[in-house]
Structures are given as C-alpha cells and as structure tokens.
Image (tube, grey):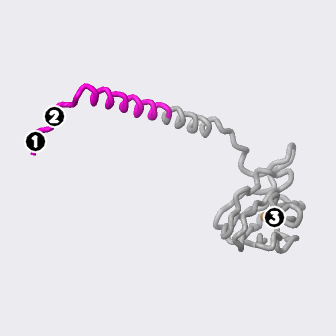
Amino acid sequence: MSTPKPPTRAHRIASAAMKDRVLHRWATLGIGVCLAVGAVACGNGPPHGSQKPGGSPIGTVVRDMPADATVKATDSLLFSPTSITVKVGGVLEFDNSGSVFHNVTFTDHSDLDDSNFPGGAKWQIKFTRAGSYPFVCTIHATTMKGTVSVS
Ligand SMILES: [Cu+2]
C-alpha cells in the first residue's frame, strides 16, 4: 500500500471546476424549487364547491362516501347510464370501470370537473342544489355525454 500522493496542480484545478459545476447545478435547482413553491403559494384555486355567478354551489367533491347513484365511464367511450337522478344531498359516483383515460366536465361548474380520470379510478360529487346538470368527457365529446338530475 502506497501512501496517497498529494493532488497535483492539474487535479486541484479539475476538482475546483467540478465543484463550481456542482454549485451551479444546486443554484439552478434552488431557483427551480423556489419557483415551484412560489407557484403553489401564489395559486388562488377556486373556492370549494361549484358556484355560478349569483348562485349557490350545486355540490362539492367528496371521497370514499357511500354512493347513492353510479355512472360508469366505459371503454366503449360512453357514460352509462347517460341520465341519472340523485336526491339533494345525494352522492353521485363516477366509476371508470375500464382502462381508457377519461375526464368528467360540468358545463358552468368547472370546479366540479375531474380532468384526471384514469382506468380504475372512482370520483364522487355530493349534490346540494336541485337542478339538471349536463356533463361530458371532453376527450370523447361526441359520444360521452350525460345529465344528472338533482331533485
Ligand atoms: Cu372519455
């Protein structure tokens, strides 16, 4: 075993350059993290619950509740059934029973939309206001439409 030689001048320069690169990378990463954190901190999301201007919310997104009615989003690019009724206070569950990626979009009530509805996913809305609310999967908009009637 020989004792380690002191670093040569060339080696010292090389390692100093490497250190600069590492520092630069961390600085860049730091700026990226700050931007990401800033974007989250500054993000003013919509209020919870859907609200038309001047109206009251029609419902809220809920999780893991017992469903009063279920609409399946199928690999045949259909909602099934296309027309469904729930009582005020009832929970409607959307069930992506296939493997095709869908979304659920409510006209005029975009804060109730689920833009991320992959195969196997379930998603629920508790409706709190009577009315008739059309929904569509915008990915398959020609075939995937439905209406929920809340009474
Ligand atoms: Cu779809």
Can residue 128 be seen in this snapshot?
no
10 Å crowding of disc 3: few (<14), some (14-19), many (20+): some
**Residue 44, position in %: x, y?**
68, 39
Q: Which residue is mark 2?
A: 5
Label 3, label 1: how far apart the Cα atoms are? 83 Å
Asked if marks 3 and 2 touch (Cβ < 8 Å), the reply is no
**Secondary structure under the numbered disc 3 in the rendered image:** loop
Q: What residue sits 71% from the left and 73% below the top?
A: 98
For mark 1, give the secondary structure.
loop
Disc 3 residue type (three-letter): Val
Instruction: Give the residue at mark 3.
Output: 88
- Check the picture and name the quadrant holding the C terminus: bottom right
Real-space Cα distance between discs 1 and 2? 8 Å
Tag on residue 2?
A: 1
- Whole-percent x and y of residue 108? 86, 50
Mark 1 neighbour density, 10 Å: few (under 14) some (14–19) many (20 or more): few
Do we see residue 86 in this rendering?
Answer: yes
Tag 1: residue type?
Ser
- Ligand 1's quadrant is bottom right
Residue at image point 75% right, 51% down: 49
Does residue 14 belong to the magenta stretch? yes
Image location of residue 32, percent across then percent down: 54, 36
Among the two numbered marks 3 and 2 on one chain, the one whose residue lies closer to the N terminus: 2
Q: Are marks 1 and 2 in contact (CB under 8 Å)?
A: yes
Give x and y (percent) for residue 35: 57, 34
Whether the residues at callouts 3 and 1 have beta carbons within 8 Å, the answer is: no
Say above or below: 102 vs 21.
below
Image: magenta residue range: 1-28
Label 2: which secondary element: loop
Q: Quadrant of residue 126?
A: bottom right
Query: How far, Cα to Cα, is label 3 from label 2?
Result: 81 Å
